[in-house]
């Protein structure tokens, strides 16, 4: 039996989501699937488009890989625009030919609306929709000073943020009297405006642009209907979207008066073999310009094509929670109180910059809508009340009052009905989560993997964790955070026990707070905690047995039992004389020599007994240990900076050396990497480090919690334009907070993602001192820096410690017989080890 | 030629490190000797050779206990070995050789099976 053909026009987020749903369904085996995409790239995450300007690439934003398409035998034809749909022949036409279909899905999305203003074709006028648009904006911005966004809605403010991140003076021009007129009311809009202006974006409301002409002091001049004008170097139009219904219109399908392909509850158009989903579809006279309703349509259609007669799209909640230019904004349900008889409660704290409004039904029992500006912490609770019709408390104002003024605590997970939607991106209800747990998911990661909850926009992360923890506890599953069988505590709890009780040895800790003798999990953790707290030599007798072999012998064990040596080369700066010493030592001991990724030199193949001799020579030449073996600061990579580079704006090498010398030796839950770049060209790749510093004309920008390696993550911008002192103080605080609160072997990236409240919470703790611990963190870091010792220097001088480096204690001259060598590319390397 | 066991002095108490291991050279190859002052017996010995990597490294592993049994974790690939039986916890078909070890005054004695007529004087 020959297969039928399914054609999808449009390879955006919704089109891709539909494919994901469809290929996982039984009907998929009966179809050949052909997808046409107008853009050159595969589907990408348009919601996070502006991250493209702060370093994300198409592959960061891509949702689905080329492999995924080929694995599922989907033919993806990118950059091939469909020019006609022929419903009678059941075919589509592209410049390359005609293709027949049995079922056709239109997922063509929308296009940006550009108001019919005279002069809008100016070469420096843009829209904000595709990666190509963004490339064009970036190119235009390179020689510009200022940029205007026309439209003060959600996307417009995103675009303004993008212009700001390109270094332009950003302006927002809005026709309505306030920002985000759809989602916010007057007071909310005013507060948002105030906050955005504080961030340096200029807002102009009640401005209608009448013409765009050549400027006098900038490229363009915008004339407004009130005879005022504004000069700027580029304009981005973000005045709303219009459904992309051209193909449907031309082929005779029903379209709405103001655009949009008319669909029924099954997402089928006026032709029974043509379907439409996402922003191009008009359902019940409504266009849905958010991704979640588009996903719901995609799921509905996949079910319909599988013959599910009950499947139907029933509308979608348009509540939104977002962060615009760092300002929390939330809008739920009937935010403007358009339902007859509604009553409002408003809380407006101009001092703190928080505005909250709730809209309540006439009988006072249900929450119909809400507006939040400045603080979204109430959003999840309010949304659950609104979506599930949960009866409001007698004093509903407590829902939006600050907690210390009688505000109600957040709605506990128990109060949510089974049907409560937890993750709207993937349509996961509390009931689905309970099912997953009953089916054997015993922790948060497995629930996420099973249900996909919280893998879309991520807005529900905290709520999901609450629900999962609560359900697990109800089922008697202790959420086990024990380190291992010897300690019923997490690493963080052990840290507190050690610090508060002044415990200085493993033996004391395990006899007072644990049981048994310890193991290779808890011993290094406790060793690290003791080192962080008291900074005693790691080879002090009590501490030796706690360390992994690399820490014990202060070198990195390689596969044949020999070690590699990495001397510290702060910032990657080294004198010719020191470089010669490294070469001479390597030659004398026949060490394999390789440059590391961290701008250092790694010397491989030293036997245990050679280590102290080699280090005596290195120390004599002025080297100190590089801690490549420790869970501690490795290296601070740097570019050459403004002392040589014609683009550099600060002395990145100098700063890297300062940082390396400050944090060297500090024991942490895992290794810590840093880098300093002398300008935004970012040659030191600082954004892939735990702590990345990038020079600006005014100081330093600090990025935190990045990662390379197995699980790459771009670092988040944490603070901008810091002075040298501010930079060090901020890093001190973050480092010490990490060291105190992270789990065992948790890099900063995962640590931050697991902090409840994430980056914002970390900012509050570190920049606003919300826990009032910053002074203590700084003091702790100072004491560690003050008591630094080069572990190798101490070790080589101490005959007792040197005894540890005997290969065989009874025969000092005996060589290890399994260490056999061969030569490759002029250097010695291990011969295959006999099993 | 006879096989017989004998006790050899391999080191003194001063060479030991509490809660940790040292390596000694014997006729049978390298042996790891562990000193666990909080257990009985306080001295245990197994082959120094890690069967998974073939490298002589087990004396440099972290010691402790799991389920009450004394263990050492290989410093290379982190498998655990029971210090009394030599059995690998992750793969019970793998077992490293165990040795008897004694404290005699200040000296540490290790039992090996000599295939030569003369034992090294104890």
Image: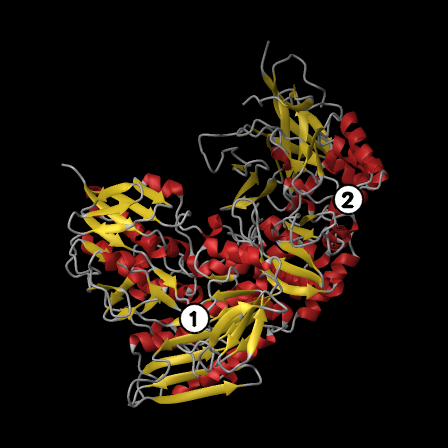
Say which residue appears at 77% left-offset and 42% top-offset.
A792
Write down the residue under mark 1.
Answer: A321
Q: Are marks 1 and 2 in contact (CB under 8 Å)?
A: no
- Chain letter of disc 1 in the image: A
Q: Position of residue A801 (x, y in %)?
A: 77, 41
The N terminus of chain A lies in quadrant: top left
Q: Is residue A193 above or below residue A542?
A: below
Q: Is residue B64 above or below residue B111?
A: below
How many numbered marks have been drawn onto this rendered protein structure?
Answer: 2
Q: Is residue A715 above or below residue A806?
A: below
Work out whether residue A667 or residue A768 is closer to the camera in this orientation and state it. A768
Left or right: A680, with B54 as reference point: right
The C terminus of chain A lies in quadrant: top right
Work out whether residue A295 or residue A715 is closer to the camera in this orientation and state it. A295
Q: Quadrant of residue B92?
A: top left
Work out whether residue A807 or residue A263 is closer to the camera in this orientation and state it. A263
Write down the residue under mark 2.
Answer: A573
- Asked if both marks, 1 and 2, belong to the same chain, the answer given is yes
Instruction: Return the mark for residue A741.
Output: none
Q: Position of residue A719 (x, y in %)?
A: 64, 65
Secondary structure type for disc 1: strand
- Per the model, the C-alpha gap separating discs 1 and 2 is 47 Å
Q: Residue furthest top?
A: B1
Q: Position of residue A815 (x, y in %)?
A: 70, 23
Say which residue appears at 19% left-offset and 64% top-offset.
A264
Label 2: how many Cα within 10 Å (few below 14, some 14–19, many 20+)? some
């Amino acid at each position: 039996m020959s297969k039928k053909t399914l054609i999808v026009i449009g390879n955006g987020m919704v089109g891709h989501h539909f494919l994901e749903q469809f290929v996982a369904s039984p009907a998929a085996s009966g179809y050949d699937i052909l997808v046409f995409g107008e853009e050159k790239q595969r589907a990408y995450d348009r919601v996070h488009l502006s991250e493209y300007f702060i370093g994300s690439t198409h592959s960061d934003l891509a949702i689905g890989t080329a492999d995924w398409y080929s694995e599922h035998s989907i033919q993806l034809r990118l950059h091939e625009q469909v020019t006609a749909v022929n419903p009678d022949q059941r075919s589509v036409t592209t410049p390359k030919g005609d293709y027949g279909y049995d079922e056709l899905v239109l997922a063509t999305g929308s296009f940006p609306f550009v108001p019919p203003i005279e002069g809008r074709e100016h070469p420096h006028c843009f829209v904000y929709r595709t990666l190509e648009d963004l490339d064009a904006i970036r190119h235009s911005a390179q020689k510009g000073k200022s940029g205007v966004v026309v439209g003060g809605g959600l996307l417009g403010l995103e675009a303004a943020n993008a212009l700001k991140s390109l270094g332009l003076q950003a302006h927002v021009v809005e026709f309505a009297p306030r920002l985000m007129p759809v989602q916010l009311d007057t007071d909310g809009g005013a507060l948002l405006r105030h906050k955005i202006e504080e961030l340096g974006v200029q807002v102009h409301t009640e401005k209608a642009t009448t013409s765009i002409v050549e400027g006098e002091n900038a490229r363009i001049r915008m004339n407004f209907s009130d005879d005022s004008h504004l000069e700027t170097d580029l304009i981005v139009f973000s005045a709303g979207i219009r459904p992309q219904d051209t193909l449907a219109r031309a082929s005779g399908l029903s379209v709405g008066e103001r655009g949009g392909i008319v669909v029924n509850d099954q997402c089928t158009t006026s032709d029974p073999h043509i379907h439409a989903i996402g922003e191009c579809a008009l359902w019940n006279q409504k266009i849905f310009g958010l991704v979640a309703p588009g996903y719901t349509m995609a799921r509905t259609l996949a079910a319909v094509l599988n013959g599910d007669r009950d499947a139907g799209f029933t509308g979608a909640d348009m509540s939104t929670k977002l962060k615009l230019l760092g300002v929390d904004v939330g809008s739920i349900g009937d935010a403007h109180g358009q339902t007859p008889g509604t009553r409002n409660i408003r809380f407006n704290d101009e001092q703190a910059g928080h505005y909250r409004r709730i809209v309540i039904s006439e009988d006072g029992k249900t929450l119909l809508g809400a507006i939040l500006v400045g603080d979204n912490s109430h959003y999840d609770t309010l949304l659950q009340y609104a979506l599930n019709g949960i009866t409001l408390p007698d004093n509903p104002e407590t829902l939006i009052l600050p907690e210390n003024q009688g505000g109600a605590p957040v709605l506990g997970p128990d109060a949510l009905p089974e049907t409560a939607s937890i993750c709207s991106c993937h349509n996961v209800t509390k009931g689905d989560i309970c099912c997953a747990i009953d089916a054997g998911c015993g922790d948060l990661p497995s629930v996420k993997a099973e249900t996909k909850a919280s893998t879309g926009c991520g807005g529900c992360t905290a709520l999901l964790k609450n629900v999962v923890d609560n359900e697990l506890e109800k089922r008697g599953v202790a959420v086990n955070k024990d380190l291992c069988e010897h300690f019923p505590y997490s690493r963080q709890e052990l840290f507190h026990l050690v610090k508060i009780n002044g415990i200085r040895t493993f033996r004391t800790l395990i006899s007072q707070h644990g049981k048994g003798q310890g193991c290779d999990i808890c011993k290094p953790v406790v060793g690290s905690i003791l080192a962080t707290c008291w900074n005693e030599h790691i080879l002090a007798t009590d501490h030796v047995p706690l360390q992994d072999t690399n820490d014990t012998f202060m070198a990195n064990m390689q596969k044949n039992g020999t070690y590699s040596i990495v001397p510290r080369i702060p910032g990657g700066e080294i004198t010719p004389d020191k470089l010669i010493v490294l070469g001479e030592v390597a030659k004398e001991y026949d060490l394999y020599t390789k440059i590391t990724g961290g701008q250092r030199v790694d010397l491989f193949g030293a036997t245990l007994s050679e280590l102290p001799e080699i280090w005596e020579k290195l120390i004599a030449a002025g080297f100190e240990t590089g801690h490549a073996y420790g869970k501690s600061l490795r290296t601070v990579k740097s570019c050459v900076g403004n002392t040589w580079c014609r683009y550099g704006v600060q002395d990145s090498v100098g700063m890297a050396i300062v940082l390396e010398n400050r944090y060297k030796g500090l024991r942490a839950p895992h290794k810590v990497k840093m880098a300093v770049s002398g300008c935004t060209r970012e040659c030191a790749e600082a954004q892939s480090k735990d702590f990345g510093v990038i020079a600006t004309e005014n100081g330093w920008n600090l990025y935190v919690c990045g990662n390379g390696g197995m699980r790459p993550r771009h670092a988040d911008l944490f603070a901008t334009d810091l002075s040298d002192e501010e930079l060090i103080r901020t890093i001190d605080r973050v480092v010490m907070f990490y060291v105190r609160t992270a789990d065992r072997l948790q890099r900063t990236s995962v640590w931050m993602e697991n902090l409840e409240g994430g980056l914002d919470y970390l900012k509050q703790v570190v920049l606003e001192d919300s826990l009032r611990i910053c002074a203590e963190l700084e003091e702790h870091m100072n004491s560690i820096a003050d008591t630094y010792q080069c572990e190798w220097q101490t070790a080589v001088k101490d005959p007792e410690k040197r005894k540890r480096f005997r290969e065989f204690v009874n025969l000092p001259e005996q060589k290890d017989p399994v260490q056999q060598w061969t030569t490759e590319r002029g250097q010695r390397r291990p011969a295959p080890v006999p099993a | 030629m006879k096989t017989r066991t004998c006790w050899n002095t391999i080191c003194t108490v001063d060479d030991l490190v509490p809660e940790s291991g040292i390596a000694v050279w014997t006729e049978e190859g390298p042996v790891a000797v562990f000193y666990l002052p909080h257990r009985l017996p306080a001295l245990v010995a197994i082959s120094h050779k890690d069967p998974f990597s073939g490298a002589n490294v087990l004396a440099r592993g972290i010691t402790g206990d799991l389920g009450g049994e004394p263990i050492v974790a290989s410093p290379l690939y982190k498998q655990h070995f029971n210090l009394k039986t030599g059995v690998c916890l992750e793969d019970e078909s793998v077992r490293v050789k165990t040795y008897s070890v004694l404290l005699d005054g200040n000296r540490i004695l290790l039992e090996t099976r000599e295939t030569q007529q003369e034992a090294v004087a104890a």
